[in-house]
Amino acid sequence: MGRAWHGKSSLVKAIHAGIAENPALKLKLVELYREDISSLGDLLDILKTSQYRFLLFTDDLSFDHDDAAYKSLKAALDGGVEGRPENVLLYATSNRRHLMPRDMIENERSTAINPSEATEEKVSLSDRFGLWLGFHKCSQDDYLAMIDGYAAHFELDGEKEKLHAEALTWATTRGGRSGRVAWQFVQDIAGRQRKHLKL
């Protein structure tokens, strides 16, 4: 349990940190803001000549009405005429399945020569990412297993049954069970027990 993974962006940063522990791999993490996506092609031209490997990371990616930046992203994912640089991977987090609002897709459809192709282009942007990881609500057993793992790792005091009861109450007041909620609960318990959580 070397690191706490409790969210989408945390997972990306943990992957980079784990790989970067080996300096021979020469991996760099570059955060790409959504408003800079239109210049992604220029960035790839610069990075492809580097001796390093890059993870380009954009957090909470989505597109709004009249936003044409998705075309730059689509071109970069497709690789264009020259192909995508071998030393660059693009990681993105999003809360949207299709990255664009449904009414934006419908508007594109209504003005296109071939409406079904316009819709497919919008929807398929998400499909151009090769690997998807879903963050779903976890079961009560999985949630309590996380609590047990953290409690053992950080040597927290208290009876298991009492800890479980408090953890379930905590999850209820936070709106659900997840890795992030488990980590926040453990931080609260450790603070009350005056323990320092060092990962």
Image: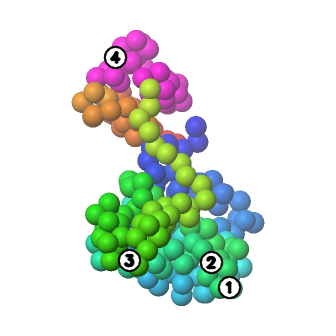
Is residue 167 within the magenta segment? yes
Q: Residue furthest front?
A: 113
Q: Separation of disc 1 and disc 2 at Cα? A: 7 Å
| Upstream in sequence: badge 2 or badge 3 | 2
Residue 182 at least partly seen: yes
Q: Which of these two is toward me, 124 or 25? A: 124
Q: Separation of disc 2 and disc 3 at Cα? A: 25 Å
| Upstream in sequence: badge 2 or badge 4 | 2
Question: Is residue 172 shown above or below 135?
Answer: above
Is residue 24 within the magenta segment? no
Question: Is residue 40 shown above or below 103?
Answer: below
Question: Is residue 94 shown above or below 42?
Answer: above
| Residue neighbourhood size for the residue with mark 4, other residues' Cα within 10 Å, grouped as few (<14), some (14–19), many (≥20) | few
Residue drawn at the location 36% of the way across and 14% of the way down: 162
Reading the image, the residue beneath label 3 is: 112
Reading the image, the residue beneath label 1 is: 82
| Front: mark 4 or 3 | 3
Q: Disc 4 residue type?
A: Ala
The secondary element bearing badge 2 is classed as loop
Q: Which of these two is toward me, 129 or 101? A: 101
Question: Is residue 82 shown above or below 197?
Answer: below
Reading the image, the residue beneath label 2 is: 79
Where is residue 27 drawn, in percent x and y? 65, 67
The secondary element bearing badge 1 is classed as loop
Q: Which residues are magenta?
A: 140-169
| Front: mark 1 or 4 | 1
Q: Separation of disc 3 and disc 1 at Cα? A: 28 Å
Reading the image, the residue beneath label 4 is: 165
Residue drawn at the location 72% of the way across and 65% of the way down: 25
| Front: mark 3 or 1 | 3
